[in-house]
Image (tube, rainbow, N blue to C red):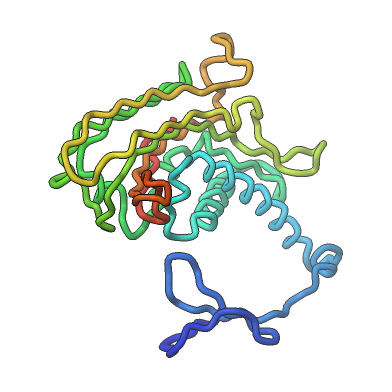
Amino acid sequence: MARVINSLQKITGTIQNATFYTIMGGDTVYLRTKGGPSKSMIKRSARFAKVRLNNNEWAGCAKMGSYMRHALGGAMELADFPVIGSMNAIAKKIQNTTVGEEHGKRGLYLSKNRDVLLGFNVSRKQVFESVVRVPIKTSLDRETASAQVIIPSINTEMYLYNFRNLPFFRFFVSMCPVSDMIYSEENKKYVVADPDFTYYGDGKDSDWFPGNGQIPEQTFDLQATLPHFTKQELPVPECITLVLAIGLEFGKVGPDGKPTPVKYAGCGKVFLVS
């Protein structure tokens, strides 16, 4: 891959067989040229048998990456770099830890590598701790599929870094279950190990607060909401990982006179996994 350096004007787009593009979060212009083996060759030729196995596993990584991004809740809206690629890469690392399974069908067991998500920040320019400078209390309980977040009272002049100098801000929290991924011989593709717990998390937003002044303590109680939730179904199955994420977004006055979020003006982080 070539890079365009010291150009007087940024170039993007396609010219003949060359494509110029940028990556989210950076100003460098990259150059990619067309070429390589055809799709038909990759699909049928014996030379590309290993490539087909790798592509099959990568499909599972992309699915796992999607579920992990979903677990970030509203924090995904604040990402200032390509989180999709980062999450897919994390999924591949998880898959590479799997032993004793056939190449091309290796499962992705987040439940055995939960700490890989701990502390993940969706913003590289402004990490959560540099913006919110107060100790946040968090708890995550697998026995009840619940979580609690307590954000203490904040003196915004002392303990909030309003890096865009915007008039409003609010918090959001989310707790979401993420299932391990396994290869289904019946379906010939990767599927979640336990669909009952997939997508049934909980998320809440605070009110909008002014950017200046003393903000009262905030408490958020979160509970997984299974469609057929019963006490007999708890605790959470071992193949499920609970992810607790917290974010803060800044806002401005919208067309209707009410606060509205400003794109990329905020931060978010994975605080707990269990």
Left or right: residue 52 versus residue 114 is right
Compared to residue 178, the image places residue 10 above or below, namely below
Q: Looking at the rendering, in which quadrant would you find the C terminus? A: top left
Residue found at the far front of this picture: 256
Residue located at (44% from left, 54% from top): 79
Compared to residue 116, the image places residue 56 above or below, namely below
Q: Where does the image place residue 154, in percent across and percent down from the top left?
A: 19, 37
The part of the image, by quadrant, that contains residue 232 is top right
Left or right: residue 57 versus residue 173 is right
Q: Looking at the rendering, in which quadrant would you find the N terminus? A: bottom right
Q: Where does the image place residue 263, in percent across and percent down from the top left?
A: 42, 55
The part of the image, by quadrant, that contains residue 25 is bottom left
Q: How many marks?
A: 0
Compared to residue 262, the image places residue 138 above or below, namely above
Residue located at (62% from left, 20% from top): 227
Left or right: residue 266 versus residue 132 is right
Q: Nearer the viewer, residue 109 or 46?
A: 109
Q: Nearer the viewer, residue 155 or 246?
A: 155
Q: Nearer the viewer, residue 40 or 131?
A: 131
Residue located at (53% from left, 31% from top): 177
Q: Nearer the viewer, residue 49 or 161?
A: 161
Residue located at (57% from left, 52% from top): 92
Q: Where does the image place residue 168, in percent across and percent down from the top left?
A: 29, 46
Q: Where does the image place residue 81, in percent across and percent down from the top left?
A: 45, 60
The part of the image, by quadrant, that contains residue 151 is top left
Left or right: residue 10 versus residue 148 is right
